[in-house]
Image: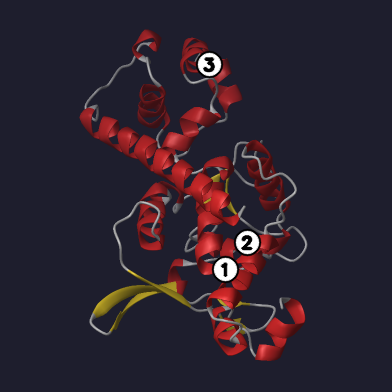
Amino acid sequence: LWGDIIIKASSQIRQIMADVELFWGALNRHHDRTHWTPKMLSTKTDCAVWAWQTFGPNLPAFSEIKKDFKPYWDRIMTVAGGWKDVVRFIYPTLPSLMPFIVLFGCYTLFNKGVLTELSFEDIEYTELAGTTRIVFTPLKKRAGTKQLRSFALDDAPDHPETMFKFLQQYTNGLRDLVDDAFKNRVFIFWGLSRRNEKYPRVSAFTGIQTGTGSEDRRFTYYWNSWCKENGFEGTPFSSLRVTGLNLAHRAFAGDVRAIAALASHSSVEVFDHHYK
């Protein structure tokens, strides 16, 4: 199951990257186009370019397009099948962001709370034995300790640094639209539901009661949806960390000190109690 989840998320990430980079290329090619007729929208990429050139970074709700741009609304429905399949070329939505979160979860073994609140300030580069590594050091609030995971650089599309740099560019247009508290978050997204005070159109993971990312019900909903769509129904997100640590436990021949370090636990007793 662990391997199947990684393969599925990796495949989806490669497709999302290809689609978004296609949009970026088309946007550059058509940067001087001042007018689109509905019939000119022949692909999802065309629809995304039209939307960006027409509305700029602050995209409208699809209902507003239906009201004020009905011929284009009809064309989007015919060509793209709906607004969400256009928006995901421009900005990450929760469905298009989930594969990245899944793969980061498998690679880093960070729990949901740490991942959902991952910040650019938690990521840096260091040299080790002549090799440059990307280092993730987010805070685990419950324990009050820094988590640590580092990776030698690689140009594979599903490598943590490649995903990180892609997400920087993919979310760049949202930085000026999201609340100040979330401007440095790695995982911010364009919400497809109606705008409201609790969940604005541009958002990050945050709980209504405590403000923590782990409390956000949207995460749970879209994780469960992703699992159901890909044949992993009933899999809790916490199982990614547990399975990863158990696999490492085997690889390190039961060396609980090594596993405690991998898990950023305060002591070996924590691993013994919660995982072993």
Mark nearer the N terminus (3 vs 1): 3
- Can you give x and y, in whole percent of width and height, for residue 64 in the image? 57, 24
- The amino acid at mark 3 is Met
Q: Residues within 10 Å of mark 3 (few under 14, many from 20)?
A: few
Q: Which quadrant, please, contains the C terminus? A: bottom right
Q: Is residue 223 above or below residue 165?
A: above
Judging depth in this view, the residue of 188 and 100 nearest the camera is 100
- Can you give x and y, in whole percent of width and height, for residue 42 in the image? 37, 14
Tell whether 172 sits left or right of 154. Answer: right
Tag 1–tag 2 contact (CB < 8 Å): yes
Q: Residues under labels 3 and 2: Cα distance?
A: 37 Å
Residue at the spot 61% in from the left edge and 83% down from the top edge: 254
Of helix, strand and loop, which one carries label 1? loop
Q: Is residue 88 above or below residue 78?
A: below
Q: Which residue is mark 3?
A: 77
Please indicate, yes or no, whether residue 180 appears anywhere in the rendered image: no
Judging depth in this view, the residue of 91 and 101 nearest the camera is 101
Q: Is residue 209 above or below residue 53?
A: below
Residue at the spot 57% in from the left edge and 30% down from the top edge: 61
Q: Which residue is mark 2?
A: 240
Q: Is residue 166 above or below residue 142?
A: above
Tell whether 53 sits left or right of 7. Answer: left
Please indicate, yes or no, whether residue 16 appears anywhere in the rendered image: yes
Residue at the spot 56% in from the left edge and 54% down from the top edge: 102
Residue at the spot 66% in from the left edge and 89% down from the top edge: 268
